[in-house]
Amino acid sequence: MSSATPPDLPTLPGRIRWSSATAAFQIEGARTEGDRGRSVWDTWVDTPGKVKDGSTAEPGADSYHRWTEDVALAKGLGLDRYRFSISWTRIQPDGTGPANRAGLDYYSRLVDGLLDAGVTPFPTLYHWDLPVPLHDAGGWTGRDVVERFTDYTALVAEHLGDRVENWYTINEPAMTTLQGYAVGALAPGEFLLFDAIPTAHHQLLAHGHATRVLRENGAKAVGVANNHTHVYPLTDSDGDRAAALAYDALHNRLFADPVLTGEYPDMSEYGVDLPVRDGDMEIIATRPDFYAVNFYNPTTVTAPAPDVPIPFDIVPTPNVEYTGFGDEWAIKPDSLRDLLIDFAGRYPNLPPIVISENGASFPEPDTADDGINDVERIAYIDGHIRAVGEAMSAGVDIEEYTVWSLLDNFEWADGYTQRFGLTHVDFETAKRTPKASYDWYRRVIAENRK
Ligand code: IFM
């Protein structure tokens, strides 16, 4: 990766909004404070061997107590918006019943603080922290969770809807289905393979119902944030091209098609029926006000060996550099451009796109006494902002770009081994130190406002 900051700042061919993101479990700490309940991620971190470095999210960046510092960081960047998530277990500790006052008050203070700082709050209702009792009742494999999520949405919307106009419903349903339920790499750690596919339907249905509830409570813009990847066959062989189509269907189309076309891609070859009931598809396909794309890396696949039960084999993307995750996370900004252009062609009624996450982790020290000159992160973000510009020039309607993340934080099963922040966090002291990328992103935002 580049060892020098690019000489000129990336500028886009039109005006967009600029944002940066975090998520509750990854930054808040304060696990039991304010009567927060337990989520599947609490179970995960309490299970020996599940988190790479044996760490927990406690106190982590401790944003529950230091949120004013984080609002100041968002303001200092000149962000239009700050994307954060609301912890279901702070609002309903057991996932049902009346709202917990302390939880509502915490997010209320955060929203007011952002508004006072001139930064628009853009919360996500669900970023993976499913309350344990709901998991015990079947989690996203069952249909009951849809009603529970709708009730939770109503509690939040009734309390914050007077000040929050823009909402993400669910973050990365694809990761919950594929990593959480199919292969068990993330909480809740189920290994259901293709039997995980119904969890996609229940999350998307929950998104559809939440959209209605949020709009009834005055929301101006609602959408789901999906994780997408541009899929490449390793070679031009028929087998590799078939593998690429299969992976594209499972990672991208399974989650985008229902929202944007009202239909699922054909999943019959996996022997799984999606549990669709009358009326579900109309609810899921309620037109979102924007379509949110979390993008990090492309995926290269090849045909699987004959005795393998899945129709693709994921292999390192060749001839590129990689992030701190090694060859699992290839750096290929033009794959973002190509994905966006493909989506605009694939979905004729595509709403405006919001890039709701984009960023990269690189090895960095635990302390930042001498500052952090994260030129690799700058090069990564620079390349992806330019890719957004190229997609805009090709006619794709893009209205927002978001860096993941405002802060170093708890990277799920990878604990603190992967730092994504524009701001370094010393996890011993929770001290925040803006990195070189923070100042660079501030200048990018200012330059693009000229
Ligand atoms: O940290 C995660 C985030 O919670 C969801 N999207 C991807 C990020 C980096 O892995």
Image (tube, rainbow, N blue to C red):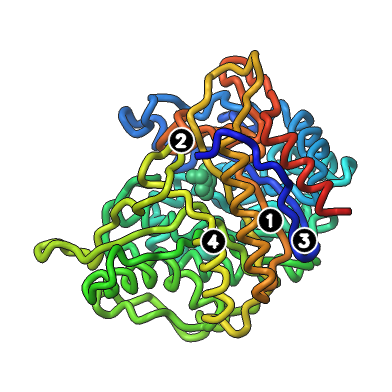
Identity, as a three-letter code, of the amino acid under mark 4: Leu
Q: Position of residue 333 (x, y in %)?
A: 53, 55
Q: Earlier in the sequence, mark 2 or mark 1?
A: 2
Q: Kindly identify which residue carries mark 4.
A: 336
Q: Kindly identify which residue carries mark 3.
A: 16
Q: Is residue 212 visible?
A: no
Please rate how many residues cluster around mark 4, counting C-alpha atoms within 10 Å: few if below 14, some from 14 to 19, many from 20.
many
Identity, as a three-letter code, of the amino acid under mark 2: Asp
Q: Position of residue 267 (x, y in %)?
A: 32, 77
Q: Kindly identify which residue carries mark 1.
A: 401
**Structural distance between the alpha carbons of marks 4 and 2:** 33 Å
Identity, as a three-letter code, of the amino acid under mark 3: Ile
Mark 3 residue's CB less than 8 Å from ligand 1? no
- Tag shown at residue 42: 2
Q: Earlier in the sequence, mark 4 or mark 2?
A: 2
**Structural distance between the alpha carbons of marks 1 and 3:** 7 Å
Q: Position of residue 93 (x, y in %)?
A: 57, 42
Assign a secondary structure to mark 4: helix
In front: label 1 or label 4: 4
Residue at (36% x, 76% y) in the render: 274
Looking at the image, residue 437 lies above or below residue 171: above
